[in-house]
Amino acid sequence: MIVQNNHSVRSQRELNAVKAMIRLYCKTLHRGAIICPECESLIEYVEERVSGCRLGEDKPSCSHCIGHCYQSAKRLQMIHVLRWTFPRYLWRHPIRALQFKLDNLHSAQMSAGKAEIFTKTG
Ligand SMILES: [Zn+2]
């Protein structure tokens, strides 16, 4: 993916953090030498959702997006993985984890304003 501006830098950063957390989750709980097919498919799913996001450049963090494009099963799986992994990720990569949190907070503040876009575009 070619990173062109601040928004896509943020999306890319979110994606990288999420992927790192899924890998950490898998390594710790599923204990394989390589990532298991289930976690691999979750990563692929997230990549696909982020790159196909209809909010494009204005995309907030997925957890604060009002467009919720994840299938509910995947969304629950994602929430579960991130809740479990975040404290561990914070311990290993404090800067990256805090950046991820900050991006989330920023998105939470923005998401109120974005509701308008959705009513316009359907
Ligand atoms: Zn796994």
Image (spheres, rainbow, N blue to C red):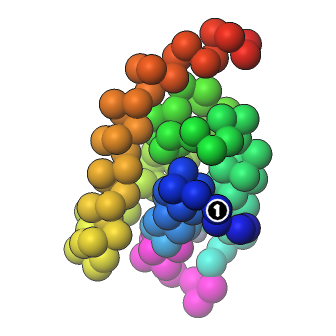
Residue plotted at (68% across, 42% down): 56
Question: Which amino acid lies under the numbered mark 1 shown in the image of this protein?
Answer: Gln
Residue plotted at (50% across, 63% down): 13
Look at the image and tell me whether residue 79 can be seen: yes
Looking at the image, residue 37 sits to the left or right of residue 29; the answer is: right
Look at the image and tell me whether residue 26 can be seen: no
Label 1, on which residue?
A: 4
x, y percent for residue 28: 43, 76
The range drawn in magenta is 22-34
Dominant secondary structure, magenta: helix
x, y percent for residue 6: 51, 56
Q: Which residue is nearer to you in this view: 53 or 86?
A: 53
**Whether residue 71 is situated above or below residue 98 in the rendered picture:** above
Residue plotted at (51% across, 23% down): 114
Whether residue 28 is in magenta: the answer is yes
Q: Which residue is nearer to you in this view: 43 or 102?
A: 102
Q: Farthest residue toward the top?
A: 119
